Image (cartoon, rainbow, N blue to C red):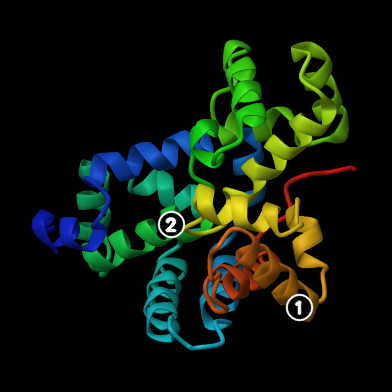
Amino acid sequence: MEVNWEEVQLALKPIKNYEDLCQRLRRSFSYAFVRETFNLTIPDLIGYTQKLLGGDARKRYDAYALHLTRTLTELHQIGVQNVLDLKSRVESREKLEDFVQRNVIKATDLAGVLKYLIYWFIPPEKYLSGLVRDNPVISNAIKGLSESGIRTNLQLLQRTITSQGRKSLAEATGISASIISELVNRADFSRLPWSSKATISNIIGAGYGSIEKLAHTDPEKLYADFFRYGKSIGKNLKLGNEIENSYRIVQIVPEILHGE
Protein backbone atom coordinates (compact mmCIF):
# COMPACT_ATOMS: atom_id res chain seq x y z
CA MET A 1 0.00 0.00 0.00
CA GLU A 2 1.51 3.31 -1.11
CA VAL A 3 1.58 6.37 1.11
CA ASN A 4 -0.12 9.47 -0.25
CA TRP A 5 1.74 12.17 1.66
CA GLU A 6 -0.72 14.89 0.65
CA GLU A 7 -3.50 12.91 2.32
CA VAL A 8 -1.29 12.28 5.36
CA GLN A 9 -0.61 16.01 5.61
CA LEU A 10 -4.34 16.73 5.58
CA ALA A 11 -4.83 14.18 8.36
CA LEU A 12 -2.09 15.87 10.42
CA LYS A 13 -3.38 19.43 10.05
CA PRO A 14 -2.59 21.81 11.82
CA ILE A 15 0.74 20.08 12.51
CA LYS A 16 3.27 21.50 10.04
CA ASN A 17 4.41 18.18 8.57
CA TYR A 18 5.31 14.60 9.45
CA GLU A 19 8.84 15.56 10.47
CA ASP A 20 7.43 18.08 12.93
CA LEU A 21 5.14 15.43 14.41
CA CYS A 22 8.04 13.00 14.85
CA GLN A 23 10.16 15.71 16.44
CA ARG A 24 7.40 16.50 18.95
CA LEU A 25 7.20 12.82 19.91
CA ARG A 26 10.97 12.54 20.29
CA ARG A 27 11.12 15.70 22.39
CA SER A 28 8.41 14.61 24.80
CA PHE A 29 9.75 11.08 25.16
CA SER A 30 13.27 12.33 25.81
CA TYR A 31 12.08 12.89 29.41
CA ALA A 32 12.20 9.89 31.72
CA PHE A 33 8.91 10.66 33.46
CA VAL A 34 7.11 10.75 30.10
CA ARG A 35 8.57 7.38 29.07
CA GLU A 36 7.66 5.87 32.43
CA THR A 37 4.12 7.28 32.65
CA PHE A 38 2.83 7.52 29.09
CA ASN A 39 4.13 4.35 27.47
CA LEU A 40 0.79 2.56 27.76
CA THR A 41 0.19 -0.81 26.17
CA ILE A 42 -2.11 -0.57 23.16
CA PRO A 43 -5.04 -2.21 25.05
CA ASP A 44 -4.55 0.26 27.91
CA LEU A 45 -4.40 3.15 25.44
CA ILE A 46 -7.69 1.96 23.93
CA GLY A 47 -9.28 1.97 27.38
CA TYR A 48 -7.87 5.40 28.14
CA THR A 49 -9.15 6.77 24.83
CA GLN A 50 -12.64 5.42 25.41
CA LYS A 51 -12.70 7.03 28.85
CA LEU A 52 -11.20 10.34 27.74
CA LEU A 53 -13.19 10.88 24.55
CA GLY A 54 -16.18 8.62 25.18
CA GLY A 55 -16.80 10.21 28.58
CA ASP A 56 -17.71 13.59 27.12
CA ALA A 57 -21.20 14.45 28.38
CA ARG A 58 -22.25 15.97 25.07
CA LYS A 59 -20.96 13.01 23.01
CA ARG A 60 -18.91 15.29 20.77
CA TYR A 61 -16.09 12.79 20.31
CA ASP A 62 -17.93 9.48 19.98
CA ALA A 63 -17.21 9.01 16.26
CA TYR A 64 -13.60 10.13 16.75
CA ALA A 65 -13.11 7.69 19.62
CA LEU A 66 -14.61 4.84 17.60
CA HIS A 67 -12.29 5.49 14.65
CA LEU A 68 -9.22 5.71 16.89
CA THR A 69 -10.21 2.53 18.73
CA ARG A 70 -10.53 0.63 15.47
CA THR A 71 -7.09 1.74 14.30
CA LEU A 72 -5.48 1.00 17.67
CA THR A 73 -7.08 -2.46 17.63
CA GLU A 74 -5.60 -3.08 14.18
CA LEU A 75 -2.19 -2.00 15.47
CA HIS A 76 -2.47 -4.38 18.41
CA GLN A 77 -3.48 -7.23 16.12
CA ILE A 78 -0.39 -6.79 13.96
CA GLY A 79 1.89 -6.87 16.99
CA VAL A 80 2.42 -3.28 18.14
CA GLN A 81 2.95 -3.55 21.90
CA ASN A 82 2.84 -0.04 23.31
CA VAL A 83 3.21 3.66 22.53
CA LEU A 84 7.00 3.62 22.33
CA ASP A 85 6.88 0.56 20.10
CA LEU A 86 4.53 2.41 17.75
CA LYS A 87 6.78 5.48 17.80
CA SER A 88 9.86 3.42 16.95
CA ARG A 89 8.12 1.76 13.99
CA VAL A 90 6.97 4.99 12.31
CA GLU A 91 9.40 7.70 13.46
CA SER A 92 10.39 8.77 9.95
CA ARG A 93 8.76 8.93 6.52
CA GLU A 94 10.76 5.93 5.40
CA LYS A 95 9.70 3.86 8.41
CA LEU A 96 6.06 4.83 7.98
CA GLU A 97 6.15 3.83 4.32
CA ASP A 98 7.78 0.51 5.20
CA PHE A 99 5.26 -0.14 7.99
CA VAL A 100 2.28 0.57 5.73
CA GLN A 101 3.66 -1.62 2.95
CA ARG A 102 4.18 -4.53 5.34
CA ASN A 103 0.77 -4.24 7.02
CA VAL A 104 -2.80 -3.70 5.87
CA ILE A 105 -3.33 -0.33 7.53
CA LYS A 106 -3.90 3.13 6.09
CA ALA A 107 -1.21 5.78 6.49
CA THR A 108 -3.90 8.38 7.17
CA ASP A 109 -5.29 6.26 10.01
CA LEU A 110 -1.80 5.98 11.50
CA ALA A 111 -1.37 9.74 11.15
CA GLY A 112 -4.67 10.22 12.96
CA VAL A 113 -3.50 8.11 15.89
CA LEU A 114 -0.19 9.95 16.13
CA LYS A 115 -1.96 13.31 15.99
CA TYR A 116 -4.28 12.15 18.78
CA LEU A 117 -1.28 11.20 20.90
CA ILE A 118 0.24 14.65 20.37
CA TYR A 119 -2.88 16.67 21.19
CA TRP A 120 -4.74 14.50 23.69
CA PHE A 121 -2.33 12.20 25.50
CA ILE A 122 1.43 12.81 25.53
CA PRO A 123 2.42 16.03 27.35
CA PRO A 124 3.81 18.55 24.86
CA GLU A 125 6.83 20.69 25.64
CA LYS A 126 5.88 24.34 26.22
CA TYR A 127 7.89 27.34 27.34
CA LEU A 128 7.11 28.33 30.92
CA SER A 129 6.60 31.92 29.77
CA GLY A 130 3.62 30.68 27.77
CA LEU A 131 1.85 29.38 30.89
CA VAL A 132 1.46 32.71 32.70
CA ARG A 133 -0.81 35.66 32.11
CA ASP A 134 -0.19 39.11 33.67
CA ASN A 135 1.77 37.98 36.72
CA PRO A 136 5.08 39.87 37.13
CA VAL A 137 6.16 37.83 40.17
CA ILE A 138 5.80 34.51 38.35
CA SER A 139 7.35 35.96 35.20
CA ASN A 140 10.43 37.04 37.15
CA ALA A 141 10.71 33.57 38.66
CA ILE A 142 10.58 32.09 35.15
CA LYS A 143 13.53 34.29 34.18
CA GLY A 144 15.42 32.96 37.20
CA LEU A 145 14.67 29.36 36.23
CA SER A 146 15.77 30.07 32.67
CA GLU A 147 19.15 31.19 33.97
CA SER A 148 19.37 27.79 35.68
CA GLY A 149 18.65 25.99 32.41
CA ILE A 150 14.95 25.31 33.03
CA ARG A 151 12.86 26.89 30.29
CA THR A 152 10.01 24.47 29.63
CA ASN A 153 7.22 22.69 31.43
CA LEU A 154 8.74 19.25 30.87
CA GLN A 155 12.16 20.33 32.08
CA LEU A 156 10.55 21.69 35.24
CA LEU A 157 8.38 18.63 35.83
CA GLN A 158 11.34 16.29 35.40
CA ARG A 159 13.20 18.18 38.13
CA THR A 160 10.23 18.48 40.49
CA ILE A 161 8.33 15.20 40.34
CA THR A 162 8.94 14.73 44.07
CA SER A 163 8.52 17.14 46.97
CA GLN A 164 12.27 16.85 47.61
CA GLY A 165 12.94 17.88 44.03
CA ARG A 166 10.77 20.96 44.48
CA LYS A 167 12.54 21.82 47.73
CA SER A 168 15.97 21.36 46.19
CA LEU A 169 15.10 23.58 43.23
CA ALA A 170 13.86 26.35 45.53
CA GLU A 171 17.10 26.18 47.51
CA ALA A 172 19.28 26.09 44.40
CA THR A 173 17.60 29.06 42.69
CA GLY A 174 16.63 31.21 45.66
CA ILE A 175 13.05 31.26 44.40
CA SER A 176 10.49 30.83 47.19
CA ALA A 177 8.96 27.40 47.67
CA SER A 178 5.47 28.82 47.12
CA ILE A 179 6.43 30.29 43.73
CA ILE A 180 8.15 27.06 42.70
CA SER A 181 5.00 25.19 43.72
CA GLU A 182 2.76 27.43 41.59
CA LEU A 183 5.04 27.09 38.58
CA VAL A 184 5.16 23.31 38.98
CA ASN A 185 1.38 23.16 39.16
CA ARG A 186 1.06 25.39 36.10
CA ALA A 187 3.39 22.99 34.28
CA ASP A 188 1.25 20.09 35.50
CA PHE A 189 -1.93 21.78 34.23
CA SER A 190 -0.23 22.30 30.86
CA ARG A 191 -0.46 18.52 30.32
CA LEU A 192 -4.24 18.78 29.93
CA PRO A 193 -5.42 18.48 26.31
CA TRP A 194 -5.67 21.85 24.56
CA SER A 195 -4.74 23.76 27.73
CA SER A 196 -3.73 27.40 27.31
CA LYS A 197 -2.32 30.00 29.66
CA ALA A 198 -5.82 31.53 29.87
CA THR A 199 -7.35 28.20 30.95
CA ILE A 200 -4.56 27.57 33.46
CA SER A 201 -4.78 31.08 34.88
CA ASN A 202 -8.57 30.85 35.19
CA ILE A 203 -8.45 27.53 37.03
CA ILE A 204 -5.83 28.81 39.46
CA GLY A 205 -7.62 32.14 39.80
CA ALA A 206 -10.80 30.33 40.79
CA GLY A 207 -8.93 28.79 43.71
CA TYR A 208 -7.78 25.45 42.29
CA GLY A 209 -4.02 25.56 42.38
CA SER A 210 -3.32 21.94 41.52
CA ILE A 211 -4.69 19.07 39.47
CA GLU A 212 -5.19 17.11 42.69
CA LYS A 213 -7.33 19.84 44.27
CA LEU A 214 -9.39 20.28 41.11
CA ALA A 215 -9.97 16.53 40.78
CA HIS A 216 -11.21 16.14 44.37
CA THR A 217 -13.55 19.11 44.68
CA ASP A 218 -17.35 19.07 44.72
CA PRO A 219 -18.59 19.96 41.21
CA GLU A 220 -21.26 22.36 42.45
CA LYS A 221 -18.66 24.25 44.50
CA LEU A 222 -16.33 24.28 41.51
CA TYR A 223 -18.99 25.81 39.26
CA ALA A 224 -19.82 28.47 41.86
CA ASP A 225 -16.16 29.34 42.38
CA PHE A 226 -15.52 29.48 38.64
CA PHE A 227 -18.48 31.76 37.93
CA ARG A 228 -17.55 33.98 40.88
CA TYR A 229 -14.01 34.33 39.59
CA GLY A 230 -15.25 35.02 36.06
CA LYS A 231 -17.47 37.80 37.36
CA SER A 232 -14.54 39.31 39.27
CA ILE A 233 -12.51 39.63 36.05
CA GLY A 234 -15.46 40.64 33.90
CA LYS A 235 -15.77 37.38 31.95
CA ASN A 236 -18.48 34.79 31.52
CA LEU A 237 -16.62 31.51 32.03
CA LYS A 238 -19.19 29.21 30.51
CA LEU A 239 -20.08 25.76 31.76
CA GLY A 240 -19.06 23.15 29.23
CA ASN A 241 -15.87 24.92 28.26
CA GLU A 242 -13.11 25.26 30.83
CA ILE A 243 -15.06 24.02 33.84
CA GLU A 244 -16.71 20.85 32.61
CA ASN A 245 -13.82 19.68 30.45
CA SER A 246 -11.06 20.42 32.94
CA TYR A 247 -12.92 18.88 35.88
CA ARG A 248 -13.65 15.68 33.94
CA ILE A 249 -10.22 15.30 32.39
CA VAL A 250 -8.15 15.87 35.55
CA GLN A 251 -9.76 12.73 36.93
CA ILE A 252 -8.50 10.73 33.95
CA VAL A 253 -4.98 11.96 33.16
CA PRO A 254 -2.08 10.07 34.80
CA GLU A 255 -0.76 11.56 38.02
CA ILE A 256 2.75 12.97 37.82
CA LEU A 257 3.59 14.82 41.03
CA HIS A 258 4.42 13.02 44.28
CA GLY A 259 4.36 14.35 47.82
CA GLU A 260 2.94 17.59 49.16
Determine the residue positioned at 73% across, 39% down. Answer: 182
Q: Is residue 100 left or right of residue 60?
A: left
Q: Quadrant of residue 230?
A: bottom right
Query: Front-most of 138 and 42?
Result: 138
Query: Front-most of 252 and 233?
Result: 233
Asked if 31 appears above or below 250 in the picture, the reply is above
Determine the residue positioned at 84% across, 15% down. Answer: 171
Q: Identify the disc placed on residue 252.
A: none
Kindly report the distance in space between the C-alpha atoms of the residues bearing marks 2 and 1: 26 Å
The kind of residue tagged 1 is Pro
Asked if 45 appears above or below 166 in the picture, the reply is below
Other-residue count near label 2 (Cα within 10 Å), few / some / many at <14 / 14–19 / ≥20: some
Q: Identify the disc placed on residue 219.
A: 1
Quick one: quadrant of the C terminus?
top right
x, y percent for residue 115 = 36, 58
Disc 1 element: helix
Disc 2 element: helix
Quick one: quadrant of the N terminus?
bottom left
x, y percent for residue 124 = 48, 44
Query: Front-most of 135 and 246?
Result: 135
Mark 2 or mark 1, earlier in chain: 2
Determine the residue positioned at 82% across, 35% down. Answer: 162
x, y percent for residue 225 = 74, 69
The residue wearing badge 2 is: 119
The kind of residue tagged 2 is Tyr
Q: Say which of marks 2 and 1 sits in front.
A: 1
Asked if 253 appears above or below 183 in the picture, the reply is below
Any part of residue 76 in sight: yes
